[in-house]
Image: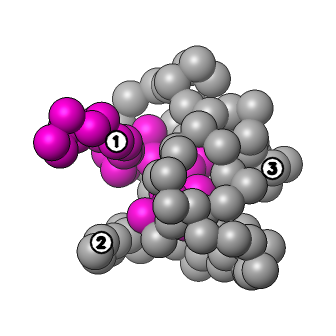
Amino acid sequence: MAIVRFPKQFTAVKKLSEKDVPFEQFNEKEKEYFGKLNNNEVISYADAFKAIFELALQQLGKKYDFDFDFKKYNNLSCTEFVYFCIKSLEGFHGLKPKEKKYLCLIRQ
């Protein structure tokens, strides 16, 4: 379960490289936000929410990902869904999947 509280506006606390995020999987709006934040511009939550909501709606009908594979987004688990929708902002607000070991299994 995740509760994500966003600020009224997003600002970058550090610069990021395209290698730090799944940039190749960003849509045009996500690339725009990533560029703006890297240029120390401010993005309002209201603007960011429109893009997040659009991404969320585009995921309707996808199958559930029982493998929890955060590298492919053709199927999504609940956690992957949240991450997928905010992936262009994640490097700036610190939400990122972490590897965990459970009974000799490694999952992100």
Q: Give the range drawn in magenta.
A: 79-108
* Left or right of 47 in this view: 16: left
In what quadrant of the picture does the C terminus appear?
A: top left
Do the residues under discs 1 and 3 have CB atoms within 8 angstroms?
no
In the current view of this chain or complex, which residue is farthest to the right? 28
Q: Earlier in the sequence, mark 2 or mark 1?
A: 2
Residue 24 position, x and y percent, is: 75, 32
Q: Name the residue under label 2.
A: 2
Q: What element carries label 1?
A: strand
Look at label 3 and name its amino acid: Asn
Type of the residue with mark 2: Ala
Q: Do the residues labelled 3 and 2 touch (CB within 8 Å)?
A: no
Mark 1 or mark 3, which has the lower sequence index? 3
Q: Position of residue 79 (x, y in %)?
A: 43, 64
Q: Look at the image and say whether residue 19 sits in the magenta stretch.
A: no
Determine which residue is flagged by label 3: 27
Alpha carbon separation for disc pair 1 and 3: 26 Å
Image x and y of residue 56, in percent: 67, 75
Q: Is residue 40 above or below residue 77?
A: above
Secondary structure under the numbered disc 2 in the rendered image: loop
Location of residue 76 with respect to 67 vertically, above or below = below
Q: Residue at x 57, y 61 (%)?
A: 65
Is disc 2 surrounded by few (<14), some (14 to 19) or many (20+) residues within 10 Å? Answer: few
Nearer-the-camera pick, 101 or 21? 101
Element assignment for label 3: loop
Based on the displayed image, in which of its 4 quarters is residue 2 positioned? bottom left
Q: According to the image, label 1 marks what residue?
A: 107
Gap in angstroms between the C-alphas marked 3 and 2: 24 Å
